[in-house]
């Protein structure tokens, strides 16, 4: 009997037969606040990115359902038309926000290139940065699979070819030794380092690919996989 009554109520709800005031304030406002509280105070634990994506996907399904229900109920509302119009506008905005959120979460967790681009854009807001006594990072940007770094060199003489070769080797070695840049190289990114003088004249351009680091860059990965299989 109770189950039958619930089915009848849900049927009336989706047919727009439930009053708009109940649909809007109970099914939309109250439930939305409850969902937001649960998410904000971490009552819903995200043990993995897949779980988080699933939860926000369910929120999107709810937003689509409440959008449909509100429009059905608003079309049968006999009071002031302005209230039914406002209800439609609010649930429409909510649906767009939910859709935008699920797209951002999908990009963040499942589109690695997007995440790298976003990190670069965020980092760019902090420039220029004094890296050491002789170099200032003034720009960083990404184009396809190449990340470009632009530095200003101070007090470094690279007029001789020998000095340039030594400097280039030092940069390549440091990139191959750094865990952060090495992870980018393993993902087939190219790191392009452009150095200019204080007059913005190019001194040297250094391009580093994973091939520059040799086959040994995967040695640690092989060891880690072996240890993991052995339960260490």
Image (cartoon, rainbow, N blue to C red):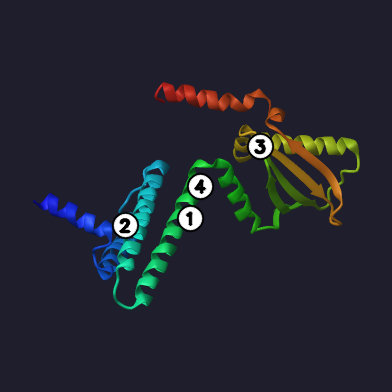
Kindly state the secondary structure of the residue where label 2 is placed: helix
Sequence order check, earlier mark of 4 and 1: 1
Q: In this orientation, does residue 95 appear?
A: yes
* The one of 132 and 205 positioned closer to us in this rendering: 205
Sequence order check, earlier mark of 3 and 2: 2
Residue labelled with disc 4: 108
Residue labelled with disc 2: 38
Quadrant showing the C terminus: top left
Sequence order check, earlier mark of 1 and 3: 1
Whole-angstrom CA distance, mark 4 to mark 2, is: 22 Å
Whole-angstrom CA distance, mark 4 to mark 1, is: 12 Å
Question: Is mark 4 in CB contact (under 8 Å) with mark 1?
Answer: no
Question: Is mark 1 in CB contact (under 8 Å) with mark 3?
Answer: no
Sequence order check, earlier mark of 4 and 2: 2
Q: In this orientation, does residue 134 appear?
A: no
Residue count near mark 2 (Cα–Cα under 10 Å), binned few <14, some 14–19, many ≥20: few
User: Which is more foreground, mark 4 or mark 3?
Assistant: 4
Kindly state the secondary structure of the residue where label 4 is placed: helix
Question: Is mark 4 in CB contact (under 8 Å) with mark 3?
Answer: no
* The one of 218 and 74 positioned closer to us in this rendering: 74
Q: Is residue 146 above or below residue 186?
A: below
| Relative image position of residue 125 (x, y in whole percent) | 64, 59
| Relative image position of residue 196 (x, y in whole percent) | 82, 50
Residue labelled with disc 3: 189
Marker disc for residue 174: none
| Relative image position of residue 81 (x, y in whole percent) | 36, 76
Kindly state the secondary structure of the residue where label 1 is placed: helix
Residue found at x 69% / y 49%: 141
Whole-angstrom CA distance, mark 3 to mark 2, is: 39 Å
Whole-angstrom CA distance, mark 4 to mark 3, is: 18 Å
């Amino acid at each position: 009997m109770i189950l039958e009554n619930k089915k009848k109520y849900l049927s009336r709800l989706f047919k727009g037969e439930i009053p708009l005031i109940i649909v809007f304030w109970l099914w939309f406002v109250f439930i939305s606040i409850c969902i937001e509280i649960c998410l904000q105070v971490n009552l819903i634990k995200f043990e993995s990115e897949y779980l988080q994506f699933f939860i926000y996907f369910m929120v999107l399904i709810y937003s689509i359902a409440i959008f449909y229900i509100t429009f059905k109920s608003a079309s049968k509302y006999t009071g002031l038309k302005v209230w039914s119009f406002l209800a439609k506008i609010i649930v429409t905005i909510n649906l767009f926000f939910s859709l935008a959120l699920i797209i951002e979460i999908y990009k963040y967790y499942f589109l690695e290139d997007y995440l790298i681009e976003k990190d670069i854009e965020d980092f760019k807001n902090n420039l220029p940065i004094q890296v050491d006594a002789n170099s200032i990072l003034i720009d960083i940007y990404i184009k396809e699979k190449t990340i470009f770094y632009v530095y200003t060199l101070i007090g470094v003489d690279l007029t001789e070819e020998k000095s340039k070769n030594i400097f280039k080797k030092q940069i390549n070695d440091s990139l191959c030794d750094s865990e952060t840049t090495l992870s980018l190289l393993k993902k087939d990114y190219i790191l392009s380092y452009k150095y200019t003088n204080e007059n913005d004249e190019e001194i040297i351009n250094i391009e580093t690919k994973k091939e520059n680091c040799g086959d040994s860059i995967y040695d640690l990965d092989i060891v880690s996989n072996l240890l993991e299989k052995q339960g260490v």
